Image (cartoon, rainbow, N blue to C red):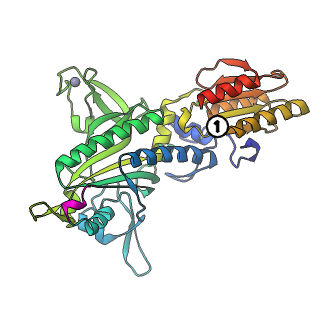
């Protein structure tokens, strides 16, 4: 991709009233733009990162047996009345009336819709278990949308739902999903802790959050340094010792990047989603649900992967793998050399962003640091036949011949 073709531009000034570093770098890097409070566009550069995260999540959910589906964002009042959440869910729903004066809401979650669907197809214990997920826009009527992509009113969520005949079967699958969550966070360059959490207005028997330790986080957790047990302070209260091993707990700040729930029969009971067990008795279906907000995950990666100059993307979700800066491009020889390297890298399927703009070296270096692509290459008068290679994270520059570069690139990607 040629940087001269970009729709967005980098900005030198932080957005007004911005506190979160991810908010500042995403806006300044040309990744996102605010439409109105808590509502954001993902610009082409931001959408590339988003799509990589989406694909990782899709792969991991498919690996634990999830079937992908798509449910509507527009939902009728009736199903929310049936679950008892029309007025109680927090944050509240966006509600409105259609032209026939029928009340609707924009879905902030899909327990009601999926319970209705599952109840219509699942008749017997022989139909269980079942696992489905979607990756879809959600809407929350937040009091104070803040911090760029960390707290928004419209966002994309991966929500998975599982249906079981017994609590034991739910417990086993719940652990499996928890393991797959750890794997997908790690692929995104994050280390997430699983902590006991409050189930809020989703309800159910118990729930766990996945928290990434970050000083900028809004969640307070207590963590056991010995056995790894952890809890959100919302449920842990003022605990000081670990309930599992009695070690002294450490307080940490973090960002919630996922929340999973053992719903049990909370929704199937209210919405009469029943199945016939082995003895021929009608019982409510046992369910679990498993959420991840995608834009928040993207912002969290930046909260823990940056320096004072900009973002440092982990390899697997970087918008491009390599950032090629062409300097002195008014020189025909340098220009054709840079174009040759660009074509060669593309021919071996490396995702290259080629900075071919008519800008100074200073501007190009600054923008490269801000945008944060893991590998930076420079072709200029000074580098001659060679290519300067620098890893964004390390900051050490090396001169490579073309063959050395191609070998290196093949080894990394
Ligand atoms: Zn412990």
Q: In this view, does 376 lie to the left or right of 204?
A: right
* Foreground of the two, 153 or 361: 361
Q: In which quarter of the image is ligand 1?
A: top left
| Residue at image mark 1 | 13
Q: At 30% across and 26% down in the image, what residue appears?
A: 251
Residue 29 place in picture, x, y as percent: 63, 39
Q: At 20% across and 57% down in the image, what residue appears?
A: 266
**Dividing the image into 4 quarters, which one contains the N terminus?**
top right
Q: What stretch is highlighted in magenta?
A: 124-129
* Foreground of the two, 171 or 293: 171
Q: Check residue 21 for magenta coloring.
A: no
Q: At 41% across and 70% down in the image, what residue appears?
A: 96
**Dividing the image into 4 quarters, which one contains the C terminus?**
top right
The reply to whether residue 37 is visible in this rendering is yes
Residue 159 place in picture, x, y as percent: 37, 52
Q: Is residue 69 left or right of residue 379?
A: left
Q: Is residue 224 above or below residue 29?
A: above
Q: Quadrant for residue 134, please give it.
A: bottom left
């Amino acid at each position: 991709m040629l940087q001269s073709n970009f729709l967005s531009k980098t900005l030198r000034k932080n957005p007004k009233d911005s506190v979160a570093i991810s908010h500042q770098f995403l806006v300044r890097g040309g990744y996102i733009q605010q439409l109105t409070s808590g509502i954001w566009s993902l610009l082409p550069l931001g959408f590339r990162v988003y799509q990589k995260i989406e694909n990782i999540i899709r792969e991991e959910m498919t690996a634990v047996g999830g079937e992908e589906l798509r449910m509507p964002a527009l939902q009728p009042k009736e199903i929310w009345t049936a679950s008892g959440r029309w007025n109680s869910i927090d944050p509240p729903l966006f509600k409105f009336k259609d032209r026939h004066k029928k009340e609707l809401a924009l879905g902030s979650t899909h327990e009601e819709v999926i319970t209705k669907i599952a109840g219509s197809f699942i008749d017997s214990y022989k139909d269980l278990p079942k696992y489905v997920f979607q990756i879809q826009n959600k809407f929350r009527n937040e009091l104070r949308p803040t911090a760029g992509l960390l707290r928004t009113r419209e966002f994309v969520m991966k929500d998975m739902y599982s249906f079981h005949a017994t609590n034991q079967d739910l417990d086993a699958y719940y652990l499996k999903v928890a393991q797959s969550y750890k794997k997908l966070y790690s692929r995104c360059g994050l280390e997430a802790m699983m902590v006991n959490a409050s189930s809020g207005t989703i309800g159910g028997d118990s729930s766990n959050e996945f928290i990434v330790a970050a000083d900028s986080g809004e969640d307070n957790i207590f963590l056991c340094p010995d056995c790894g047990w952890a809890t959100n302070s919302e449920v842990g209260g003022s605990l000081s010792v670990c309930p599992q091993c009695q070690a002294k707990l450490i307080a940490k700040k973090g960002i919630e990047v996922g929340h999973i729930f053992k719903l049990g029969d909370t929704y199937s009971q209210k919405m009469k989603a029943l199945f016939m067990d082995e003895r021929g008795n009608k019982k409510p279906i046992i369910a679990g649900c498993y959420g991840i907000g995608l834009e928040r995950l993207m912002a969290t990666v930046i909260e823990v992967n940056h320096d004072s100059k900009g973002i440092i993307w982990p390899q697997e979700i970087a918008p491009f793998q390599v950032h090629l800066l062409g300097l002195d491009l008014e020189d025909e020889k340098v220009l054709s050399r840079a174009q040759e390297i660009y074509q060669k890298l593309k021919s071996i399927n490396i995702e290259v962003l080629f900075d071919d703009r008519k800008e100074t070296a200073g501007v190009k270096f600054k923008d490269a640091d801000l945008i944060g692509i893991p590998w930076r290459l420079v072709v200029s008068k000074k580098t001659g036949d060679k290519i300067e290679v620098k890893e964004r994270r390390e900051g050490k520059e090396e001169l490579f011949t073309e063959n050395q570069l191609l070998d290196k690139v093949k080894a990394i990607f």
